[in-house]
Amino acid sequence: MPVGKLYIISSVAGGGKSTLIEMLLKKYPEIKFSISVTSRLQRPGDIVGESYKFISKDEFEELIKQDYFIEWAVVHGNYYGTPKKILDDWLGSGEKILLDIDVQGAASIKAHFPDCVSIFILPPSEEIWMKRLRDRGTDSPESIEKRIRNGKNELERTSEFDYRILNDDLKKAFSELEAIVISPITLD
Ligand code: 5GP
């Protein structure tokens, strides 16, 4: 029976993770991307059903009760969760699956699937990270401050990850990501 492989990518907000994921999925369309469910409001640039499934806080809490998620967490004050069913289906059919989740989610998934590969994308420096976050123009000033505070806590947990990629040069960071996710099959 084929067994799929899970790859987790985490970062601080503004760490450049979304760009790297986009590049990877474009180059390797066979990789499945797990679309999370969230109670956060849609932001400019979000594509409904592609970035996230957007639902209300009440609806999210109902899904928690129904055991719909393999993991869920409150991130920057909103609910985010990974649907269980699609992940199980893909794993059962041997797919390579990418999860874009935070450090809490990464720890839960690692506990469920110890063989998963976790990758943390590090921003080049605190100064550049904060500038990127402020310049992307998608968050309110309060939301930016919250993401900086949370990001500092997340940066303290990067040793929990199997790999850390410094995103100081997009091309180099992408090659490193590619080398991890598209590694040749080894027989043991
Ligand atoms: P954003 O709102 O900026 O798209 O995402 C905020 C954070 O939530 C990011 O760190 C992202 O990786 C994380 N996130 C997105 N989906 C999930 C999920 O399903 N579970 C968890 N635990 N975190 C998620």
Image (cartoon, helix red, strand yellow):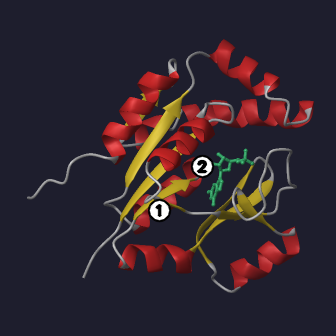
In this image, 113 relative to 81: left or right? left
Query: How many numbered markers are drawn?
Result: 2
Q: Which residue shows up at 32% across the image and 47% down it? A: 182
Q: Give amino acid for label 1.
A: Ile
Q: Is residue 132 above or below residue 35?
A: above
Counting from the top left corner in percent of width and height, residue 164 is at 42, 33
Residue 123, image quadrant: top right
Q: How far apart are marks 1 and 2 (CA)?
A: 11 Å
Measuring 43% from the left and 60% from the top, which residue is drawn there? Answer: 30
Q: Is mark 2 within 8 Å of ligand 1?
A: yes
Q: Which of marks 1 and 2 is nearer the N terminus?
A: 2
| Residue at the bottom extreme, as displayed | 66
Which sits in the foreground, 187 or 140? 187
Tag 1–tag 2 contact (CB < 8 Å): no
Given the image, on which type of amino acid does mark 2 rest? Asp
- Residue 180 image point, x, y percent: 33, 42
Left or right of residue 138, residue 69 in this image = left
Q: Where is residue 187 shown, x and y percent of the image?
A: 10, 58
Give the quadrant of the N terminus.
Answer: bottom left
Helix or strand or loop: what does disc 2 sit on?
loop
- The quarter in which the C terminus is drawn is bottom left
According to the image, label 1 marks what residue? 109
Q: Position of residue 52 (x, y in %)?
A: 72, 60
Task: Give SS at disc 1.
Answer: helix
Q: Within 10 angstroms of label 2, few (less than 14), some, or many (20 or more) residues?
A: many
- Does the residue tagged 1 have its C-beta within 8 Å of any atom of ligand 1? no
Q: Which residue is drawn at 51% across and 24% down?
A: 170
